[in-house]
Image (spheres, helix red, strand yellow):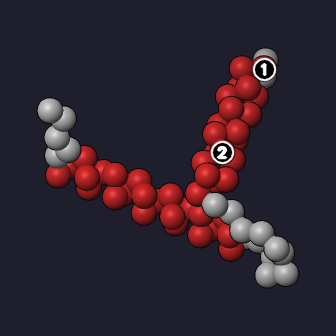
């Protein structure tokens, strides 16, 4: 049986709070007149893309 420790729950809470904070920061960049906002999924995808692009740049530089 798989049990979750208090540490794991605390760590999960930290990740959720951090993600919500990043989403809030992304949405602060959206103009007030815009008809969209970023979701947590959007932010995760953008961060993954950014990391991929950064790693590609590092491998292609002389």
| Residue 35: image location, x then y, percent | 82, 74
Q: Secondary structure at mark 2?
A: helix
- Name the foreground residue: 57 vs 13: 13
Q: Which mark is residue 60?
A: 1
Q: Is residue 56 above or below residue 3?
A: above
Write down the residue under mark 2: 45
49 on left or right of 13: right
Please identify the quarter of the rendering in which residue 43 is found. Answer: bottom right
Drawn side of residue 10 relative to residue 33, left or right:
left
Residue 26: quarter of image: bottom right
Q: Residue at x 14, y 32 (%)?
A: 1
Quick check: marks 1 and 2 in contact, CB under 8 Å?
no
Residue 54 can be seen, yes or no: no
Residue in the image at 70% along x and 41% along y? 50
Q: Which residue occupies the foreground of this view, 39 or 27? A: 39
Q: Distance from label 1 to label 2 (Cα)?
A: 23 Å
Location of residue 37 in the rendering, given as x and y in whole percent from the top left corner: 72, 68
Choose top left, top right, bottom left or bottom right for residue 16: bottom left
């Amino acid at each position: 049986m798989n049990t979750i420790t208090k540490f794991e729950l605390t760590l999960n809470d930290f990740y959720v709070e951090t993600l919500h904070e990043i989403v809030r920061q992304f949405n602060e960049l959206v103009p007030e007149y815009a008809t969209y906002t970023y979701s947590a999924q959007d932010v995760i995808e953008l961060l993954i893309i950014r990391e991929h692009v950064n790693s590609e740049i590092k491998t292609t530089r002389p």
